[in-house]
Image (spheres, grey):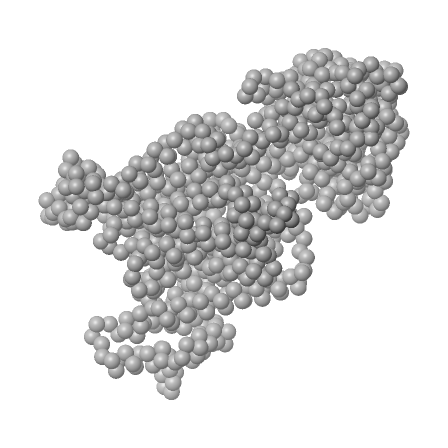
């Protein structure tokens, strides 16, 4: 399997008032074409930062070391102007909270169109056709009508479908889904998960699925990276991880399925540095 | 939608009626007898009685009040027989001081207030929003700190102090501007512009500073929104990301505040007009209050309240256009 | 800041927004310290006004015709509006009253009116806002209608009209009452909103369930939670009212002469600004710096509270 994305020894550092802090430390993994890789970890484990580093969307001031290669090209250190051409086109991302991730002032159609036209050009009319097709493709009924809806007019699950339609509109090679089902109802979660898995198989996109819930990726991931406090705990094939986890922490994660977790936001940076283990897992 | 507007209009009428009633009660019960004021120093009780009679001040309160209200909607007659004067609707009565029709006075002076308000508004919108935007984008830099420091200072200068300082520097010392004169635009556009320039600057300064701070805060808040991260993740150009995704959400609340501020100004910029001797509604208000000219006071109060209440309604209606999330639901 | 910008980093065991922490933050802020120092100076001047008069030998209403040139229509002798060792901030044209003494006595008027108006506004705003938010229902309806009505009023025109129509009486008290009557809805609106959300919070529900009386709920559970926003709103209200008082006095409906007030001093300087600019510059500068210092202080206090809530 040829690798689509190769991350090697990635370290992300943030300046803080108490000096620089590594929020991601020496993480390495790879995603093949047509493969789903799961990144699992508790809140504050650095999994979101890893995905933002790949996209080149880290907050100002953050520094990175190591290597991120997409299709063989190094992404780290490239100017934003060049990364911009890749973002949305070669790689795109779905976020946790679809309501706040969509701009409330514009129709979903326009938000899909602008992305398509930024990379593919063409007329608004053509882009609109693409947007309608994309919305239909993710299972939204009546896409011709829904294309003119505003985000608030959809339900939570529908909004996440819109986000997925948007992320896939340029048929990217890599899709990063950062906790895409966490903010949704349980039944809707399953639907979105099935949709993502189906689209991934169909389009052959490499998928990075980030979650705090091992159960969610057990069915779709071929490789799994377990992270904790910014560090890589375990990395291997899904069978390996689920059947015979090497690390104590992974075992604890596995044992905690199903677990209760009502926090949607990730907790503080502080817990990443020095909280006792029992605080991380319920 | 129609039902909502009709409901709101009814509310507007109720509030204006209450403003009317409140003002009327206040002047009916509190103010020194206008007849005595009109009569002057050499006055006889008979003369006062005569004046009271002509002005209808001898009638009971409610008769006077409804006479006034009736005048607005249907017009009214003053005096009787050969002296009968008809005042067509909308009639706001006649000035106790000059005997001029109050409606005519308002119509004559409103354009001056509108000119002051519009010119100042253009100025403060351009300066305030541009400065705020720049500060937000360059948050934490030398420019940001300087601009925000100036904005804090500028919003603390009382406008009459600024007016005096400007006049002293520009008119007396540097002599780059003439003293403001009442010149029509068609007569001499240059003098017209020069005359309005200082009032515009004085009035705009406070607002520009306020809007700069508001714009900066709103833009910074918007830049931190999740949808901005989405926009960047889509590979849009920074210009488009800023223009489309940041500006509209950040500036929409400012549009509503602007509507309210502007409406209030149409009712007269009292201090600015007085300081610069501009014959607008604001100066008319100050003059009428100084001379206890009751019909004029009633008119300016009503007019200002009218602008505020109608401005409020217009802002709410416009907001439903600006923010798709706001939809009118009739209770 | 970059750290706080990402959701992965925010929230956590927030340090209590204690008054002491806010004061510590303010003491490290140069703007806040300078503003505080200036305001302390003004307060001292206001309190010590009679002392200043005693030391300089000029009361606020003592004429000093020797300090003005009667041949030139009463322009003060000397440059800068007659600033000299005798009159530290110069004299008024025509009658030669000492400006320092008038500024000091004027500070009393400004500060007393602004602070009392703020206190009355806060009282009205908190009581009515909490009534509306706590009981809701018809009390809320009535209070909201009254607020809508008052906020629709052209406040400045109306304040002037009322003040000019009212009998002379005790001007400062009238000013305070009139300012407060038109000022409380802005505060009450915020208090009402916050009370409404607080009433439904778990800890209030819990207190209610454990049999707390209405009074206990209001004073022990709700009021303490409004504290920080009240502190911020009141500090930002004071400069507004200093400006309002000066504006009303400038328009001739504020405190009546010979009681000095900064706004009134500026008003009387209008006819003189061309020949004696110091006459408006000095009270103008005092007024400007006072409003600015209060605004800066209020701004920094708000920032300190906000930072406390965010961290």
Residue at image coords 39%, 51%: C117
Is the residue C215 above or below the residue C56 in the image? Answer: below
Q: Residue at x 75, y 23 (%)?
A: A41
Q: Is A72 on the left or on the right of C53, as rendered?
A: right
Give C206 or C45, whichever is nearer the viewer.
C206
Q: Residue at x 23, y 48 (%)?
A: C272
Quarter holding residue C82: top left
Q: Quadrant of the C terminus of chain A?
A: top right
Question: In x, y percent, where is residue C299?
Answer: 46, 37
Question: Which quadrant does the N terminus of chain A fall into?
Answer: top right
- At horizontal 31% and vertical 64% (from top left) the residue drawn is C167
Horizontal relation, residue C52 to residue B141: left or right: left
Between C162 and B301, which is closer to the camera in this rendering?
A: C162
Location of residue A30 in the rendering, given as x and y in whole percent from the top left corner: 80, 16
Q: Quadrant of residue A128?
A: top right
In the image, residue C6 sits, relative to residue A144, either above or below, namely above
* Closer to the camera in the image, C289 or A206: C289
Give the x, y percent position of residue B178.
31, 47
Farthest residue toward the bottom? B81
Residue A76: tell me if it is visible.
no
| Residue B306 position in % (x across, y down) | 49, 62
**Would residue B26 be seen by someone viewing this image from the given angle?**
yes
């Amino acid at each position: 399997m040829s690798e689509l994305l190769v991350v090697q020894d990635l370290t992300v550092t943030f300046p803080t008032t108490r000096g620089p802090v590594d929020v991601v430390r020496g993480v390495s993994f790879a995603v093949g074409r047509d493969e789903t890789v799961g990144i699992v970890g508790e809140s504050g484990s650095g999994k979101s930062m890893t995905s933002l580093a790949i996209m080149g969307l880290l907050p100002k001031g953050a520094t990175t070391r190591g290597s991120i290669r997409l299709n063989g090209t190094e992404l780290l250190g490239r100017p934003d102007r060049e990364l911009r051409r890749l973002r949305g086109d070669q790689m795109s991302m779905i976020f946790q909270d679809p309501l706040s991730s969509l701009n409330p002032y514009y129709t979903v159609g326009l938000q899909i169109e602008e992305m398509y036209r930024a990379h593919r050009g063409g007329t608004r009319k053509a882009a609109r056709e693409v947007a309608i097709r994309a919305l239909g493709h993710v299972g939204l009924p009546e896409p011709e009508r829904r294309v003119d809806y505003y985000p608030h007019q959809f339900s939570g699950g529908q909004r996440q479908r819109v986000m997925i339609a948007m992320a896939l509109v340029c048929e990217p090679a890599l899709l990063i889904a950062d906790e895409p089902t966490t903010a949704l109802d349980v039944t809707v979660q399953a639907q979105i998960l099935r949709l993502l898995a189906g689209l991934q198989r169909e389009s052959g996109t490499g998928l990075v699925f980030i979650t705090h819930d091992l159960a969610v990726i057990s069915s779709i991931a071929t490789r799994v990276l377990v992270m904790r406090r910014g560090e890589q705990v375990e990395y291997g094939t899904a069978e390996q991880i689920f059947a015979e986890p090497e690390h104590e922490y992974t075992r604890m994660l596995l044992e905690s399925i199903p677990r209760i977790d009502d926090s949607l936001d990730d907790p503080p940076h502080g817990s990443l540095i020095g909280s006792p283990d029992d605080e991380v897992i319920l | 939608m129609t039902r909502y507007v009709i409901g709101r209009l009814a509310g507007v009428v109720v509030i204006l009626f209450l403003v009317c009633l409140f003002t009327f009660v206040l002047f009916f019960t509190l103010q020194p007898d206008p007849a005595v004021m009109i009569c002057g120093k050499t006055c006889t009780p008979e003369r006062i009685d005569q004046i009271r009679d002509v002005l209808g001040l001898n009638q009971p309160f409610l008769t006077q009040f409804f006479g006034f209200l009736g005048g607005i909607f249907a017009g009214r007659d003053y005096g009787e027989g050969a002296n009968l004067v008809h005042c067509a609707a909308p009639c706001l009565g006649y000035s106790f001081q000059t005997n001029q029709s109050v409606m005519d006075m308002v119509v004559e002076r409103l354009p001056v207030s509108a000119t002051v308000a519009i010119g100042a508004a253009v100025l403060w919108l351009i300066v305030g929003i541009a400065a705020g935007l720049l500060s937000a984008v360059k948050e934490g830099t030398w420019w940001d700190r300087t601009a925000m420091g100036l904005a804090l200072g500028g919003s603390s200068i009382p406008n009459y102090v600024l007016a005096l300082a400007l006049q002293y520097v520009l008119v007396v010392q540097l002599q780059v501007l003439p003293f403001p004169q009442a010149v029509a635009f068609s007569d001499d556009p240059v003098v017209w512009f020069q005359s309005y320039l200082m009032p515009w600057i004085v009035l705009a300064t406070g607002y520009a500073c306020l809007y700069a701070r508001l714009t900066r805060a709103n833009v910074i808040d918007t830049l931190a929104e999740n949808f901005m991260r989405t926009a960047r993740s889509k590979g849009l150009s920074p210009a488009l990301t800023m223009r489309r995704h940041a500006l509209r959400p950040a500036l929409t609340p400012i549009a509503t505040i602007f509507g309210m501020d502007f409406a209030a100004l149409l009712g007269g910029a009292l201090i600015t007009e007085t300081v610069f001797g501009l014959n607008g509604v604001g100066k008319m208000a100050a003059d009428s209050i100084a001379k206890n000219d009751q019909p004029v006071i009633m008119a300016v109060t009503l007019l200002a309240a009218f602008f505020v209440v109608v401005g409020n309604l217009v802002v709410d209606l416009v907001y439903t256009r600006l923010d798709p999330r706001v939809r009118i639901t009739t209770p | 800041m970059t750290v706080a910008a990402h959701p992965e980093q925010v929230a956590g065991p927030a340090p209590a927004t204690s008054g002491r922490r806010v004061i510590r933050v303010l003491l490290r802020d140069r703007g806040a310290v300078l503003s505080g120092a200036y305001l302390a100076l003004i307060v001292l001047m206001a309190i010590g006004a009679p002392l200043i008069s005693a030391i300089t030998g000029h009361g606020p209403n003592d004429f000093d015709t020797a300090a003005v040139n009667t041949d030139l229509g009463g322009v003060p002798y000397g440059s800068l509006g007659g600033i000299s060792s005798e009159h530290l901030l110069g004299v008024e044209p025509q009658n030669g009253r000492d400006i320092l003494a008038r500024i000091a006595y004027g500070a009393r008027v400004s500060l007393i009116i602004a602070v009392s108006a703020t206190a009355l506004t806060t009282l009205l705003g908190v009581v009515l806002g909490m009534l509306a938010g706590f009981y809701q229902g018809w009390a809320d309806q009535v209070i909201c209608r009254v607020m809508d009505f008052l906020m629709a009023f052209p406040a400045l025109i109306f304040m002037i009209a009322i003040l000019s129509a009212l009998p002379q009486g005790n001007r400062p008290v009238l000013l305070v009452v009139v300012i407060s009557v038109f000022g409380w809805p802005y505060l009450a609106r915020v208090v009402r909103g916050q009370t409404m959300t607080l009433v439904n919070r778990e800890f209030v529900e819990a207190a209610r369930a454990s049999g707390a009386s209405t009074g206990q709920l209001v004073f022990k559970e709700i009021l303490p939670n409004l504290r920080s926003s009240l502190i911020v709103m009141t500090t930002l209200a004071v400069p507004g009212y200093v400006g309002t008082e000066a504006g009303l006095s400038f328009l001739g409906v504020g405190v009546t002469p010979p009681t000095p007030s900064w706004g009134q001093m500026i008003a009387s300087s209008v006819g003189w600004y061309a020949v004696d600019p110091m006459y408006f510059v000095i009270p103008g500068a005092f007024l400007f710096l006072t409003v600015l210092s209060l605004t800066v202080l209020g701004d920094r206090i708000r920032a300190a509270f906000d930072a406390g809530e965010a961290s």
